């Protein structure tokens, strides 16, 4: 995996900063400049309009002299830091706050066009070449008898507006810088809470991919990253456990196949080379046949369990009396129990107890549990089979008084090929698959099976089924 995620995040952060400065320097700068220009123009226009309606109008109505109006314009121009003109529609200067009165040689604005403002009341530029710098010029018409006699034009330098715009722009840059600095906190949290944990998880997945399922790492977090790490470690532990189980599975299969095959080969070789006399052949051929039956049973168990895992347990649901199934299963072991003087006690709930399940597969469960109980029971002992009903569930118990299961081995009884050290000495023909098949069938019914065992006292298996009405 290329370690570029962090670099991509940094690159995105830099792009964010660059575009932020571009937007501030262009969009924000231009909008601020235009806004300040408009506000300044509105302020100046009010003054120009006031002059047009007072002093300038008085000038054209001859109620005030040029000198008087000139003095007022000079004072107001100084106060406003602006240049104030009164010009006639042809562009001839009448009064200027920055020029002395010269009636004989008036200044003329070449190319003057009062419509230059368009739909607005101000314009920017050099005002028809009258200035050497850019100025803001505001028009206010002077009217008398419903006719435009001239214009009050106030010019103010754009340098002040540009300075104000730069001041606002500096504040915007400062705020952007603060924002970028604060956003480093996000980068820090991303590094601590996302990137570093993700880096650990990546390293762990590389170890797991290489086969090191026992690699350990820790992420001290209760968020999704911590959950992901915990699930990844759990997955690795399960895979490691599965690998260990697979090794045990192969070892158990090898052991359970090798033992009968070794016996078969040994007896056959002994009969062929004369070690076993002909009159004893029948006896030992019976032993060989018994061993082949054991191999057949082991093979069939493996195939059955493999089909359950690969295809799933296909159930044929029906309502049936579990008490009757138990009775018929017990009859199958009548001969075996008689030979070993083992009694089977039935404590069945009511005359009938109907359940909803797959009758044939539940019969297989009962057969395997009873077979298991008989194998590990002592001669002249008893096995108790009991059915009870609670909370709309039927509970079936198969309890023996045999050798029991060691405490540390109880949790493994449903594993394939499980045989405790005690059972290996007791059960010579078992395959270790019966309880695994039982577990698969009960799980397919969405029910549960539990085991209670005390070494030297006995073992009890209890499973549940959905109860139904008759």
Image (cartoon, grey):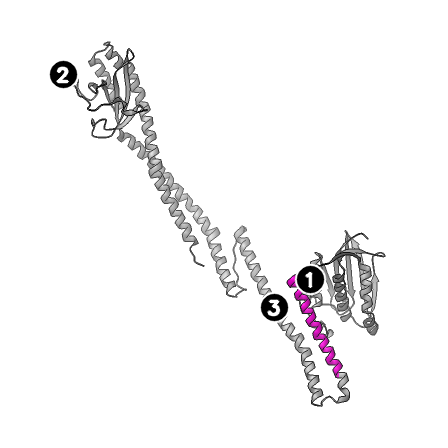
Residue identifier under label 1: 440
List the residue tagged with mark 3.
246
Quadrant, the N terminus: bottom left
Examine the image and state in which quarter residue 181 appears.
top left
What is the count of numbered marks?
3
For the view shown, which residue lies furthest in the right direction? Answer: 351
Please indicate, yes or no, whether residue 233 appears anywhere in the rendered image: yes
Could you tell me which residue is drawn at 23 percent across and 15 percent down?
69
Main secondary structure along the magenta-highlighted residues: helix
Q: Position of residue 21 (x, y in %)?
A: 35, 41
Q: Is residue 385 visible?
A: no
Which tag, 1 or 2, sits closer to the chain's start?
2
> What residue is shown with label 2?
104
Relative side of 33 to 457, left or right: left
Q: Is residue 12 left or right of residue 156?
A: right
**Numbered disc 1: secondary structure:** helix
Residue at the (28%, 18%) spot, across then down = 141
Q: Are marks 1 and 2 in contact (CB under 8 Å)?
A: no
Q: Position of residue 40 (x, y in %)?
A: 31, 26
- Density class for disc 3 (Cα within 10 Å; few <14, some 14-19, many ≥20) is few
- In this picture, residue 149 sits left or right of residue 425: left
Asked which quadrant contains residue 113, the reply is top left
Residue 203: percent from left, percent from top: 48, 60
- Mark 2 lies on a secondary structure that is loop
Q: CA distance from mark 1 to mark 2?
A: 120 Å
Q: Nearer the viewer, residue 373 or 283?
A: 283
Q: Which residues are magenta?
A: 284-311
Of the residues under marks 3 and 2, which one precedes in the sequence? 2
Q: Position of residue 29 (x, y in %)?
A: 33, 35
77 in relation to 209, above or below: above
């Amino acid at each position: 995996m290329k370690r570029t995620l962090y670099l991509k995040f940094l690159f995105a952060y830099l792009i964010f900063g660059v575009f932020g400065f571009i937007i501030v320097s262009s969009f924000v700068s231009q909008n601020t400049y235009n806004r300040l220009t408009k506000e300044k123009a509105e302020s100046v226009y009010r003054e120009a309009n006031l002059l047009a309606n007072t002093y300038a109008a008085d000038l054209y109505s001859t109620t005030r002299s040029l000198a008087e109006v000139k003095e007022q314009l000079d004072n107001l121009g100084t106060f406003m830091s602006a240049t104030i003109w009164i010009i006639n529609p042809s562009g001839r200067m009448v009064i200027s706050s920055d020029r002395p009165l010269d009636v004989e040689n008036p200044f003329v604005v070449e190319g003057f066009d009062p419509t230059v403002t368009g739909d607005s009341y101000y314009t920017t530029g050099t005002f028809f070449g009258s200035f050497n710098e850019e100025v803001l010029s505001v028009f206010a018409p002077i009217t008398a008898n419903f006719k435009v006699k001239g214009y009050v034009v106030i010019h103010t330098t754009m340098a002040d507006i540009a300075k104000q715009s730069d001041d606002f722009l500096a504040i915007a840059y400062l705020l952007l810088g603060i924002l970028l600095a604060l956003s480093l906190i996000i980068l820090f949290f991303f590094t601590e809470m996302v990137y570093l944990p993700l880096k650990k998880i990546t390293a762990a997945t590389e170890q797991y991919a290489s086969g090191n399922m026992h690699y350990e790492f820790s992420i001290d977090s209760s968020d999704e990253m911590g959950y992901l790490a915990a699930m990844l470690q759990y997955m690795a532990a399960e895979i490691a456990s599965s690998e260990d189980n697979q090794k045990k599975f192969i070892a158990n299969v090898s052991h359970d196949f090798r033992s009968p095959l070794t016996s078969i080969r040994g007896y056959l070789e002994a009969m062929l080379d004369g070690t076993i006399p002909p009159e004893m052949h029948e006896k030992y051929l019976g032993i060989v046949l018994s061993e082949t039956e054991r191999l057949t049973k082991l093979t069939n168990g493996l195939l059955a369990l493999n089909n359950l895992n690969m295809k799933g347990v296909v159930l044929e649901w029906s309502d049936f009396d579990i008490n009757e199934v138990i009775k018929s299963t017990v009859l199958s072991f009548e001969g075996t129990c008689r030979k070993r003087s083992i009694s089977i006690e039935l404590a069945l709930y009511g005359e009938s107890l109907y359940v909803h399940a797959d009758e044939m597969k539940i019969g297989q469960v009962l057969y395997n549990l009873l077979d298991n109980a008989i194998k590990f029971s002592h001669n002249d002992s008893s096995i108790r089979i009991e059915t009870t009903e609670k909370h709309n569930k039927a509970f079936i118990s198969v309890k023996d008084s045999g050798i029991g299961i060691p405490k540390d081995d109880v949790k493994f009884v449903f594993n394939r090929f499980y045989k405790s050290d005690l059972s290996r000495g007791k059960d010579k023909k078992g395959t270790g698959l019966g309880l695994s098949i039982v577990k698969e069938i009960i799980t397919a019914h969405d029910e549960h099976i539990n085991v209670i065992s005390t070494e030297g006292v006995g073992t009890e298996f209890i499973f549940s089924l959905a109860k139904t009405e008759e």
